[in-house]
Amino acid sequence: MVRFVGKQCLLSIPTILLLTFFVFAIVYLIPGDPAEALLGNTASPEAIAAYRQKMRLDEPLLVQYGVWLGRVVHGDLGVSVRTSEPVIDAIVARLPVTLQLSAVALAFALVGGVPLGVLAATRRNSAWDGVAQLVGLAGLAMPGFFLALLLILVVSLKYGLLPVSGYVSFTENPVESFKSLLLPAVTLGFAVLGAITRMTRTAMLEVLGDNFITAARAKGLRERTVLVRHALKNALIPVVTLTGLQLGSLLGGTIIIEKIFGLPGIGRLMIDNVYAHDFPVIQGVLLFLALIRLATNLATDVLYALLDPQVRFQ
Amino acid sequence: MVMLGGWKRLLSSQLAMAGLLICVVIVALGLAAPMTAPYDPAQLGAGLPMQPPSASHLLGTDELGRDVFSRVVYAARIALYVSLASTLLAAIVGIPLGLVSGYYRGWVDSVVMRVTDAWLAFPVMVLALGMTAALGPGLNNATLAIGFVTIPLFIRLTRGQVLSLSQRQYIEAARAAGQSNTIILARHLLPNIVPVLIVQFSLAAGSAVLVETALSFLGVGVMPPTPSWGSMLSSAQAYLLMAPWMAIAPGTCIFLLVLGLNLVGDGLRDALDPRTAR
């Protein structure tokens, strides 16, 4: 197992290097001088010249990349043009909100999706199956921002059940904090809910057709035991993988959700700085989210290997 | 014959047909926008501001008195254009890279695979947003950004297909007969991957619609005065309680188009997959 994890980590080193290069190179897409873009248009010519010198912007691209990477490796993502705050601090400060939001969203998707998928598979062509397939399709096609507006309209504006927007921190008031996260989390988790429902249904249907299920039934086990201990346990392996892989896109979805609901998280940091053309922050968030995604994918691979011993020996 | 059976299965799938119908209706409405739209989409004060749906304004009017139905119909053109153009761009770049990578293997394959790994590490929405931040907003830049984030999906899929098809006997036969690599790639491998690619194309087009409308919603995609479903939703946000139709009309359009493209994609996949053939 240790060897497996080690090998996976080694394999991701070139990926991480390339990924940092993507992030580095994005400022070269900006029309004009990257130094000007990185310092903002209020910077004086002297400041720009000094910056060019410091980042060695007059040298070949690969040298520039090396200089940039050297700083990033030491945790220096640069400073925000607008606020002069170190980018890494800005990200760390916003992280708790985004993590809470993603956790609640994921919990909602799992708690809703797995049972619904199981019900659909065990009662094929029943009303439950219809609901499951509908949720599966809606999860694919429903834009998060439209769902958010619909929920705000009905739940918050018409019936006043939950706040329209704003964030209350957990330490301040746990109940209000949960209430402020509920609608954003449901919106964010809906697409994942659809995917988990579909995957659970398909995996359960496949497993239920297997011989070992027939054998378990023939042994006289109760149907409950057959379903939960034998079928679900196996069907959950692809569901776990899917959930792990969805984690990264969940973080991408936080951009719009945090903006609509006014949550001060990483997604909000990203979009605010896109508006402000604050490229050091944009680069920092890009890098951070891609690394998180890579890490969760790696963790998913390891978890998959733990759950399914066949993978380890390939 | 396989294709023929596949089409028959596709036609008999009600969901796929419903999806096709949705797509056809949206394409027809969009293409014929000058005829189907009763008003100029940019005309201020085509009616009173924020009127609910009525006979003269099928989907009501917005905060500036513009006809929502006319705007929705013109915005369909934008959604379809961006989705088609970006997916086409991704396919044109991604498919050859996947073919070469899967067929020649070796160091080319290693390089291409590591690059796509890094590419795919970025959540789609985040990378598209980062690119539009650098490129600037607008129709063409949004198309470019969405196309760019879709490329690795086509590389991956094509490569995987080539890897599995290369083992087949007819490819070995072609090689034994002394046919050149170019001929094998273009005449023997590519045509057999086309069905899978069509499926991928319709699914990718659906996701492109979601990304374009999201970018436009955030105000960094298609810019006003060009009507986009995303920007319509964004301005509807302020008048949610007073004029919900301003949000419901474009939002439903996005939902239906993406749903349609996904249903068609799923239907095609089932129809073309011999394993589910009955």
Image (cartoon, coloured by chain):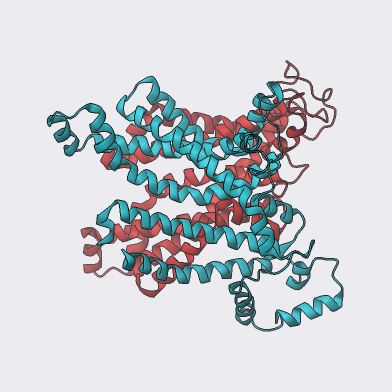
Q: How many marks?
A: 0
In the rendered image, the quadrant that contains the C terminus of chain A is bottom left
Which residue is depicted at the point 66% across and 53% down?
Answer: A94
The answer, for residue B226, to whether it is visible in the render is yes
Instruction: Left or right? Give the position of B266 relative to B143.
Output: left
- Horizontal and vertical percent position of residue A43: 84, 70
Which residue is depicted at the point 66% across and 47% down?
Answer: B215
On the image, which quarter does residue B134 sit in? Answer: bottom right
- Horizontal and vertical percent position of residue A294: 48, 60
In the rendered image, the quadrant that contains the N terminus of chain A is bottom left
Palette colour of chain B: red
Which residue appears farthest toward the left when viewing the image?
A219
Instruction: Left or right? Give the position of A132 relative to A268.
Output: left
- Horizontal and vertical percent position of residue B269: 37, 41
Palette colour of chain A: cyan
Q: Determine whether B251 is above or below A169 in the image.
A: above
- Horizontal and vertical percent position of residue A4: 33, 65
Instruction: Left or right? Give the position of B29 relative to B244.
Output: left
Q: Determine whether B225 is above or below B124 in the image.
A: above
The answer, for residue B27, to whether it is visible in the render is no
On the image, which quarter does residue A233 sit in? Answer: top left
Which residue appears farthest toward the top when viewing the image?
B55
Which residue is depicted at the point 48% across and 47% down?
Answer: A246
Which residue is depicted at the point 67% across and 65% down?
Answer: A29
Of residues B22 and A186, the one nearer the viewer is A186
